[in-house]
Image (cartoon, rainbow, N blue to C red):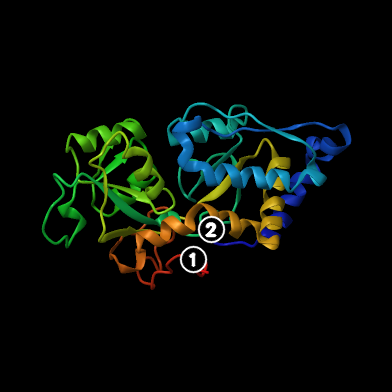
């Protein structure tokens, strides 16, 4: 169920008022610690999320004071991330789709899709040498690739598709080079960046031009329940950025050009049902393709 930011703030208000840390954060000058995973150049594809989080924190200095970001230099499995954010010591802020392991952790969810539906549009990175040459009428004709324990795995399995799994993101490209599968479907928010970045090491890497895999996959920010003041800050910051237009500006800055080149609305769509969300209405509605800013 979707909720407005105002509703989120109303729900979080009692938690904030009950938190001694939150009450005292400005009065004592305590610096709020924000912890999420960031492996530097290995996570460059998450640049939009990192910039959005910083904008959220900057926009709420007056209410919550200073902050420090303490990045975690690893990317644990989703189950491990769920445990760590529930503890709130190593990780206290993550992004994930509702119903997934992270979202089921001991977290406060801010139900605003920070990717505005974009993560549900999946485009294939392929090795042309072994990609089927004839018409693709079913995903059963393709061997897909996915990362180990990616939340998307449950979506594919729920629809009778069994991807090959790679132990790391980087290993998936070695596997594609070895022709161990046909298609690495990545979200429209990151597939172009990944293609440009990885093509240097893997010259064969190609964007498949005709197919689109779609499933409902909103991406929310989740905060450890042990840091309710941070959840209040994130909700307020998102509200401010939406109201002043900065949220949309950042989104378009990172995604508009790349998404336009993908021509999502001209592709053949394979719609999958997500086990993480209510089944009613899935794959029954007309797709709402991303609305891009008009060219000047």
Q: Is residue 187 above or below residue 138?
A: above
Res. 113 in view? no
For the N terminus, give its image quadrant: bottom right
Q: Label 1: which residue?
A: 292
* Depth order, front residue of 77/115: 115
Q: Is residue 182 above or below residue 257?
A: above
In the picture as drawn, the residue positioned furthest to the bottom comes out as: 286
In the image: residue 78, left or right of residue 167: right
Q: Position of residue 183 (x, y in %)?
A: 24, 47
Q: Label 2: which residue?
A: 252
Q: Position of residue 288 (x, y in %)?
A: 43, 69
In the picture as drawn, the residue positioned furthest to the right comes out as: 27
Give the residue displayed 38% in from the left and 54% down from the top.
275
In the picture as drawn, the residue positioned furthest to the left comes out as: 134
The answer to which of marks 2 and 1 sits earlier in the sequence is 2
Question: Are circles 2 and 1 on residues that touch, CB within 8 Å?
Answer: yes
């Amino acid at each position: 169920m979707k909720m407005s930011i105002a509703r989120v703030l109303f729900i979080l208000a009692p938690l904030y008022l009950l938190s001694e840390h939150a009450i005292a954060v400005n009065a004592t000058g305590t610096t709020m610690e924000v912890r999420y995973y960031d492996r530097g150049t290995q996570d460059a594809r998450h640049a939009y999320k990192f910039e959005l989080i910083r904008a959220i924190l900057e926009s709420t200095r007056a209410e919550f004071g200073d902050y420090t970001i303490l990045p975690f230099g690893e990317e644990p499995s989703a189950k491990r991330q769920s445990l760590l954010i529930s503890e709130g010591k190593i990780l206290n802020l993550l992004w994930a789709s509702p119903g997934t392991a992270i979202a089921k952790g001991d977290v406060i969810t801010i139900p605003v899709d920070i990717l505005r539906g974009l993560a549900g549009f999946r485009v294939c990175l392929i090795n042309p040498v072994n990609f089927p040459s004839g018409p693709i009428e079913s995903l059963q004709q393709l061997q897909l690739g996915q990362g180990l324990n990616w939340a998307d795995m449950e979506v594919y399995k729920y629809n009778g598709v069994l991807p090959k799994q790679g132990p790391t993101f980087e290993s998936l490209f070695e596997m594609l080079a070895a022709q161990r599968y046909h298609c690495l479907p990545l979200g429209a928010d990151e597939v172009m960046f990944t293609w440009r970045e990885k093509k240097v090491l893997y010259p064969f890497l190609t964007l498949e031009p005709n197919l689109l895999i779609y499933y409902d996959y909103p991406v929310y920010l989740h905060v450890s329940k042990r840091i309710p003041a941070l959840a209040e800050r994130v909700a307020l910051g998102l509200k401010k950025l939406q109201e002043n237009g900065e949220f949309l500006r950042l989104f378009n800055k990172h995604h508009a050009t790349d998404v336009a080149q993908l021509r999502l609305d001209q592709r053949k769509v394979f719609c999958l049902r997500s086990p993480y969300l209510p089944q009613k209405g899935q794959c029954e509605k007309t797709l709402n393709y991303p609305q891009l800013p008009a060219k000047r």
